[in-house]
Image (cartoon, helix red, strand yellow):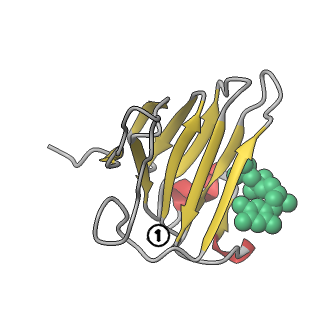
Amino acid sequence: MADPLTQLVDIPQHGDARGQLAVAELGGALPFVVRRIYWIYGTKPGVSRGFHAHKKLRQFCVCVAGSVRLILFDGRREETVILDSSAKGLLIGPGLWREMHDFSADCILMVLADAEYDEADYIRDREAFVRHEP
Ligand code: TYD
């Protein structure tokens, strides 16, 4: 059977009577050295984002508040995953088309990446992505 496109990683939680603390560190939940962090928040109702793939970039997505639905597509198979917990990280490797839908009003989607922003690493056309040789 083909490997799942959706790679969810458990993020260790250190909750106590005061509340929660979640940790993603190298050698633990985090499989790469982080060179960039960004977060998506304040998404307007009905807005979808993404609609691109990366040639080389690896990303680790954590929905630290609210919820969002992601679609992952490898050119043949498509999977849907709902992120609604800061205790789960979604690993998105290169060569996966991603779309983000149904952001809750309070959604904060934090993305850790293994490289700086590089527009040349993006494939923004779905047909070009399907034709793209890895
Ligand atoms: P965009 O690629 O449209 O985001 P999404 O994946 O949510 O669809 O990025 C929005 C804008 O932000 C675009 O002008 C590029 C810019 N941007 C950066 O400058 N650095 C970054 O690390 C990212 C992710 C985006």
Spot occupied by residue 103 in the image (x, y as percentages of width and height): 67, 28
Spot occupied by residue 133 in the image (x, y as percentages of width and height): 46, 69
23 or 96: nearer the viewer: 23
79 or 112: nearer the viewer: 112
Q: Quadrant of the N terminus?
A: top left
Q: Amino acid at mark 1?
A: Glu
Vertical relation: 43 (above or below) 93:
above
Q: Residue at x 74, y 72 (%)?
A: 119
Spot occupied by residue 87 in the image (x, y as percentages of width and height): 39, 40
Vertical relation: 92 (above or below) 102:
below
* Left or right, 15 with reference to 108: left
27 or 92: nearer the viewer: 27
99 or 77: nearer the viewer: 99
Q: Residue at x 48, y 54 (%)?
A: 96
Q: Residue at x 41, y 55 (%)?
A: 23
Q: Which residue is mark 1?
A: 133
Q: How many marks?
A: 1
Q: Residue at x 52, y 73 (%)?
A: 34
Spot occupied by residue 26 in the image (x, y as percentages of width and height): 36, 71
Q: Quadrant of the C terminus?
A: bottom left
Q: Does the Cβ of the disc 1 residue fall within 8 Å of ligand 1? A: no
Q: Residue furthest front?
A: 17
Vertical relation: 48 (above or below) 28:
above
